[in-house]
Amino acid sequence: MIRPLDSSLLGRRGAKRLWNRCPANRWLEHDLEQWETIRVGSSASVESPAPLARLQPSRPTLAGRAATSIAKIWGEFAQDGFWLSCMVAFALLWAVELWIVQKMTIESAQFDIWGPRYLFWMPKIRFAIDLCFTLSCALCLGRRGLVLACFLSLFFDLGLLAYTANYHRTFSLLTVYTQWNDGQSLAGFDPTLISKWAMVAFGVALVAKLQLVTVAARPRFSFAMQWGLVALCVAAYCGLMFTINQADPAKFSKLLNRRELAYFCASRGYALPWLMEWKYLGNRETLQTALDDRQQTSDRLTPLESPLAVGDRLVIIQVESLGYDVIGTRMNGREVTPFLNQLKDQSYFYRVTAPVYNGSADADFSLLAGAEPSKTTVNYNLPAYPFDNALPGFLANYHYGTTALLGGRGVVYNRRAAFEKMKFSQVLFAEEIVERYSGRIANLGVSDAELMGLSSLLMRQPAKKTCHFLVTVGSHAPFNTLANSQKEVFPNSLDANENYFNCVRHVDNTLRDYVMGLPANTTVVIYGDHTAPISQPGYQTDRDGTSHRVPYLIYNVGQNLARSQRTRDSSVAQSGQLTLTDMANYLRAQVAGSQASPSDLPDLRLTANR
């Protein structure tokens, strides 16, 4: 016979534990509690017609639920206020650090197209974008993640500063990736170019961020609260990006032609522009289209024109906005280009079509590559584009040293990276001219007089063979670079159309001083990159859509070549049917015909693109 267990032998706690171990006992206890509640309620209020109805909780109102939620949120903030304060301070310090690095490493040549209102708000919006990013990281990463982020951020910031100081361009993930794949690593990378004060400042910021992470207690936020805050920051980030994209008239597709990467980084930071760079410039189809376009080579002049003895010193000058019709034009009773008018009578002289599909960079690309540019993309913007048959490499086969001198900055049309890939012996943009030769940047770049003066100085240095490729900026729109004392055609004019002729006259004077100072037998090539959109009585812009007619002169210092030009009075030279590609390949053919090359080299005159 089973006897009931005496609870006194187990004690009160032991009996309770034994009772709770039996599920049937717990169910019975639960039912008894419910009946007891009903019984007590019934005896307390006999008049209530529906005692069971009071057991059902009433549905709270919307205001009540909102108040409850706010109270809950406030309670979580109250219990984790110190941690939240530390994270906000951490995010703010990190955002300031990112903003300063961006300001120091993003250089664009196209800020002038923005109005003053946009320029005022641009850096502020970028700081808000940075703050949304750092807040998101601070809220969703744990202590270890934030410590790792601090060190990665320091490494990244110092790397950006060193890269910009070393290469004078905005860092491009796509450029580094493609050049690394091609075996062109970051040779010459010099971390010592970073300012010591910058390293100290970033080191102090690192210590401060680590201290904030260390002293902050572990958060006790609920999962919904923590990730709700993160979602709010991400939504603000996306909203700011949407706002800046709507306010900026230039869309990301402009990366293909008229905008460089830095233009977009300046207002949006690095992340989104890098993604868009991969989408547009890293597209295989875009590169293949450019490669297909460069197969359109042309060499129609070589079989028709007289041979030319190219000197050991070769100068090629691309003059900004020099249209064909400006040669020989008189405005306000004065010759606009008196020197070029005389020079063409002693030179091979042509009316040539310059391509302007994407911008003025198409002209120098045609001359340097000996092929047609892409119809949709500035070739210089494509990091994977191969410049395997560029003019500097071609001239190196004939022992020419090549120097590029450009009055503008290297960021314009991303020329710097492209010119380095072309294997110029030396590349001097406005930045190098200022740094190495005490030049001065005014308006769009170094003045034409300083540019040509530097070329003249370098030409005097002993060298067996040398070639200088110059690109001027003095006659660039909006034609407002001259002082009143320099305006000869229309004195003291404030009209843009009239000042175009003043600028061209000033460039003509500079060319006169430069060419007249060159050594005898120096071969000089002068051409325009495109025409100017000028509307002036007595002058008509010589252009047709994307085809601009420009002058092209070939002159040997101390010689009169005009009498030996076979095509001088023919339609070949005057109709505009010749392109800059034709002229580039004619020049190469004359170099190959007049300069001794190593016997083991193949015939390079046809300039077939590989």
Image (cartoon, rainbow, N blue to C red):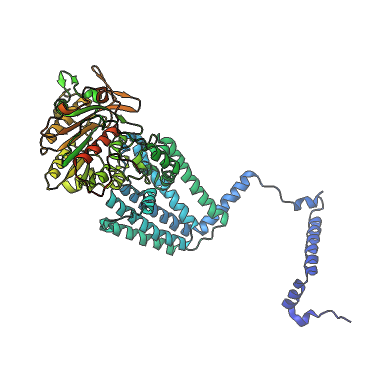
**Residue 180 at x, y = what percent?**
37, 54
Image position of 587 (left or right of 139): left
Q: Is residue 74 something one can see in this rendering?
A: no
Image position of 138 (left or right of 399): right
Q: Quadrant of residue 26?
A: bottom right
Q: Is residue 26 above or below residue 315?
A: below
**Residue 530 at x, y = what percent?**
28, 30
Task: Look at 49% across and 48% down and name the residue there.
Answer: 234
Q: Nearer the viewer, residue 261 or 13?
A: 261
Residue furthest out toward the top: 537
Q: Quadrant of residue 273?
A: top left
Residue furthest out toward the front: 599
Q: Nearer the viewer, residue 423 or 34?
A: 423
Task: Look at 41% across and 61% down and name the residue there.
Answer: 212
Q: Quadrant of residue 152?
A: bottom left
**Residue 27 at x, y = what percent?**
79, 65
Q: Which quarter of the image is occupied by the N terminus?
A: bottom right
Residue furthest out toward the right: 1
Q: Is residue 135 above or below residue 470?
A: below
Q: Is residue 561 something one can see in this rendering?
A: yes
Q: Nearer the viewer, residue 526 or 347?
A: 347
Q: Which quarter of the image is occupied by the C terminus?
A: top left
Image position of 301 (left or right of 377): left
**Residue 544 at x, y = what percent?**
33, 24
